[in-house]
Amino acid sequence: MLLIRRFEEKSAELYQEEKIRGFLHLYIGQEAVAVGTLDVLEPDDAVVATYREHGHALARGIGAGPIMAEMFGKVEGTSRGRGGSMHIFDAATRFYGGNAIVGGGLPLAVGLALADHLRGLQRVTVCFFGEGAVAEGEFHESLNLASLWKLPVLFCCENNLYAMGTALERSESELDVAVKAASYEMPAWPVDGMDVLAVRDAARRAVDAVRGGGGPYLLELRTYRFRAHSMFDPELYRPKEEVEAWKKQDPIDGFVGKLQEADLLSDDELEALKADAEADVDEAVAFAEAGTLEPVSDLTRFVYSEDPAEEGS
Amino acid sequence: MLLIRRFEEKSAELYQEEKIRGFLHLYIGQEAVAVGTLDVLEPDDAVVATYREHGHALARGIGAGPIMAEMFGKVEGTSRGRGGSMHIFDAATRFYGGNAIVGGGLPLAVGLALADHLRGLQRVTVCFFGEGAVAEGEFHESLNLASLWKLPVLFCCENNLYAMGTALERSESELDVAVKAASYEMPAWPVDGMDVLAVRDAARRAVDAVRGGGGPYLLELRTYRFRAHSMFDPELYRPKEEVEAWKKQDPIDGFVGKLQEADLLSDDELEALKADAEADVDEAVAFAEAGTLEPVSDLTRFVYSEDPAEEGS
Amino acid sequence: MSATGGNGPTTTSTPTVTYREAVREAIREALTRDERVFLMGEDVGRYGGCYAVSKGLLDEFGEARIRDTPLSESTFVGAGIGAAMGGMRPIVEIMTVNFSLLALDQILNTAATFLHMSGGQFNVPVVIRMATGGGRQLAAQHSHSLEGWYAHIPGIKVVTPATIRDARGMLWTALEDPDPVLIFENALLYDTEGPLPQDAGPVPLEGAEVMRPGDNLTLLAYGGGLRKALEAATLLEGEGVDAEVIDLRCLRPLDDDTILKSVGRTRRAVIVDDGWRSGSISAEIAARIGEQAFWEMDAPVERVCGAEVPMPYAGHLEQAALPSPTEILEAALRTLARPGR
Amino acid sequence: MSATGGNGPTTTSTPTVTYREAVREAIREALTRDERVFLMGEDVGRYGGCYAVSKGLLDEFGEARIRDTPLSESTFVGAGIGAAMGGMRPIVEIMTVNFSLLALDQILNTAATFLHMSGGQFNVPVVIRMATGGGRQLAAQHSHSLEGWYAHIPGIKVVTPATIRDARGMLWTALEDPDPVLIFENALLYDTEGPLPQDAGPVPLEGAEVMRPGDNLTLLAYGGGLRKALEAATLLEGEGVDAEVIDLRCLRPLDDDTILKSVGRTRRAVIVDDGWRSGSISAEIAARIGEQAFWEMDAPVERVCGAEVPMPYAGHLEQAALPSPTEILEAALRTLARPGR
Ligand SMILES: Cc1ncc(C[n+]2csc(CCOP(=O)(O)OP(=O)(O)O)c2C)c(N)n1
Ligand SMILES: Cc1ncc(C[n+]2csc(CCOP(=O)(O)OP(=O)(O)O)c2C)c(N)n1
Ligand SMILES: [Mg+2]
Ligand SMILES: [Mg+2]
């Protein structure tokens, strides 16, 4: 979580410096969700995320360097600089983006799970999306299909209360996301998304059930983004006090507090961890800075596969 | 109901004779739904239906002649022969199709209701769709939006158990359509769609509530189509016995039986009614036969409005 | 012409089959040959396919591999994309192109972009089949010809099997292709018949084909338009005109070479396109001929396209809205009447 | 040129405004002028619009008329269509063209067909606005230029305001149009500035416009491409070439007359199109020039289009993927170097 936090803070700075361009969506405040859920996955499980996915990518074990290089538009980036912040991909950890169409990742996750189901593999696909995506038709279609076919998907709805500037109560007639899952006969429960241990516990139970063949599950992870939606957002839609109140529930402070109460983390150790994170991020930036740009002559590469023999994944 | 039944039987014959072409979806078996619901509407309420809409059009009071002429492709048809069986429209009775994209009519109905809401009119929009449409994303989006904005729509799901050859349990993880409505905080209840009086009672209560400003309602009308999905369907997907069993619940026989039990309808009266229906249909066919074809030179009319001054509806 | 994928000159019987049977046979072969292949779509199983293409396959291959889906175009297409990335080789059937608009986001924003967005990591070997075209009085929401429109999208391939051989042979090649392939089957072709050698096999996806050689002008057509072009060529023969007819076969990528070789020789061309004229693939072809054969052409390229109108139901209007052999004939005579340069 | 809708020669001040302000002012005027008008879309209210276009309008006009919608593109577009038929005059905002694919079924199968399918009974006076275009490093799912592609659809009109005046003046005309109008606002234009007379009013939707007269060749452009064409014209001036620049303004219907009048005189043309080249609107324009001005042209029509690649994030690649003034210049010089006939 410290790494994600520091990585995101640095990204914001680099955006100001115009090293990072395009859209940048920070994960600050929501770290416990990615860290808690992805901790319980096996290496060959699959992850589908959104444009707000740096945290998930880092928690999945993708290097900070390649992610940063991606945002610098460098060949050394996770997607050779062709994707940018919103499109982190990694075949090695089965990280399927980085999807920037709200709701677009859900059918994909259903399909990945269908493949596992048909191939008889005991793998799980975890699909992250915001509560804003719940209003999209694809949410409905995907939950129905996954449940109907009993596919191994864990749907993780990160409910940070806002979709850009639209509060949940302005987009949903029924506010309880878990209630919605019931209309697909899908088990679902809400989780305190600011408590990494609670998230991990819930995720473990859900992932075990999914892997065991119980069909899909849905977790509603209640969280909050501390920063603006993207770097363009003047945050007219929510009171400063609300943000401040949520910041009191900072997932990192909370977890550190618990560890320290239990005497499991000394101040020195904490400082060392922070220094590690800082160093990792610095190294990532250096890696990105040192990266190279794809030659313009390669512009139209990767529109179609280059060697039919290397097909498949 | 007698008129609809006879009209549909005749249409099937005329299809064999190749007077009617394209797709033809018969309403036989489901008559009580259209008749029962539309009976309680006011003249300036709106109706949105599907490609299986002859029954609704007739029950709404659109003439059998123009409907038949439409299927003959004649200028005297409801849509000047440009729509055919699947696209019956009528501005006078606010009958907005005749929509042949499954689920496509729902957003439209929401919009018509939104207009009434914004204009402060106490009108109701009734939207018919099959249970197959429930799986479409637009069902989800439309129910949510209508409920969120408390719009005056009555959603009528005609559950005839099959979407073409796909039985409900093969398309839905949760079979109870009314349960789904709960996830939009929308009141909903199931109705015996073979009993025209039950349908009318339920529709009256629902329409009154909607008109009173209570927001949208959903009725699940449980019914069955006695004929094939369309004229191309070999009906491989359902056992003959199932069809025969449902035919014992014929909505017309049932209603006639009730009337006769209560001594409200003599055999002679029944025969007279049947003869009337027969005569009406014969007249409709004659009207259609006598109709004219649009000149080919007018092919590209109605792509854009012809006189900007006649805008609006 | 011989089936491109045949295995040498063995003597085999050549039964007459319908286009429908050819597609079914292609699906059956794929299912038999590769266990990663499965068929998914609305009513492909119990109903037997809305055009009876997959009739019998459920019994033969079972529910796991012949999958009826709910009415959820966006999601089952997206699931096909996901399954393809997950190691399967799905054949996704969208009943008709008209409903594919509901899945267009998945096709354009996911299938067509993933390889690129992931810097080459994730290719999408999905095959999406759909029926297309008008001509059966199905009116404005069931008669689109959008295959040429789809050809605008980089990252996908668009093929339009117009012959029994291609109906039989393109599917397997499409399944072997590492990238998304959209197969458009003109619904009017399903009942057409023709000979198909029993050992007919895969054919290349790309490459236009000369179906009838000729010297006086070139008729370019695809999908449902090919028959009409061939008919027009016969009519033209009656007028003493020797028309070359080319089946484009693949709309993305277009085979510029074959087109240019032909028009460079005949110096006159008519393009037949069921799609609405403005912004149709016929425009792209005409533009390319203008760009690459400007000085070779003796007359403007003629386009015989669908009328720019939502398809009317009435039969006589619908026929007027679609290209006809007579219209092609007239266009050909018009272009031949031009003075040349 | 003077604002078409002006009310005679009154002396009014001409402040400098941004394109964004011009659009906002147009919306504000429409809301003020006609109580049937309302604005609906994602984040148009509290957030102030994803491009800050509608900032302040919620406070001014209230929740009933500035309606934030859930993320449900298909349904709120469909609801706009329904509301239009129900007597209102909705302005539906889709954040960007990229997400409009989710609503394409409603646009093509409902908005564009209803008038026809109902035999002229139900027209659909809906206005749908959306941002379009690349150039801001938003990568493959957020950079489409599909306005030319939309122009394929009969039953809708497609306009591409490229100037402050059109940003201000097209909306009202669109709202008065009885049929669906799609307004594509290139997102790079929102920050551009220019003079706008305080009494600027409605302008016609249709009709291309000569933005810079010239004799040597014609540059045809629209939307985000217009600036580039004008820049190229300046560069060409440095080379001693006098280029005419035409703003197409409306992609459906295209204004053949203005185009043909110009190219008939200059005999050489370059089309600038941000969209992917194959099957772009530039192809249609080139095809029409070929059809209608075959003997007038001295050289093949050149097209400077978007590269056929999902948009890459990296700035240098993205710039290479989009038409640039330099590329236009080169194409112009290429066409001028042709021998002529
Ligand atoms: C289909 C679609 N519509 C609109 C957008 C623009 N958009 C990007 S993020 C966003 C908000 C999504 O909110 P939510 O799902 O809650 O995720 P969060 O940003 O809160 O993580 C919107 C509207 C989009 N990317 N895709
Ligand atoms: C979006 C879309 N997908 C598929 C079809 C083809 N189709 C026409 S009717 C139908 C079945 C619909 O079933 P249901 O909604 O239950 O209505 P019913 O026919 O039973 O009245 C299908 C799949 C279509 N018209 N639209
Ligand atoms: Mg959110
Ligand atoms: Mg049904």
Image (tube, coloured by chain):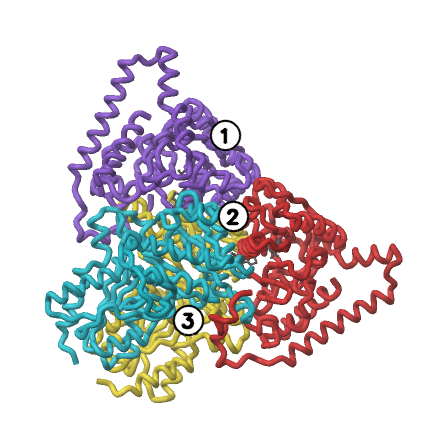
Chain colours: A purple, B red, C yellow, D cyan
User: Marks 2 and 3: same chain?
Assistant: no
Residue A190 is marked as: 1
Which chain contains the residue that carries disc 3? C
Type of amino acid at the residue the image marks with label 1: Pro
Type of amino acid at the residue the image marks with label 2: Glu
For the N terminus of chain A, the image quarter is top left
Residue hosting label 2: B141
Q: CA distance from mark 1 to mark 3?
A: 53 Å
Query: How many tags in the picture?
Result: 3
Q: Regarding mark 3 in the picture, which secondary structure is present there?
A: strand
Residue hosting label 3: C274
Q: CA distance from mark 1 to mark 2?
A: 23 Å
The percent coordinates of residue C19 (x first, y second) are 46, 66
Which chain contains the residue that carries disc 2? B
Q: Tell whether B75 sits left or right of C339.
A: right
Residue D310 visible within the image: no
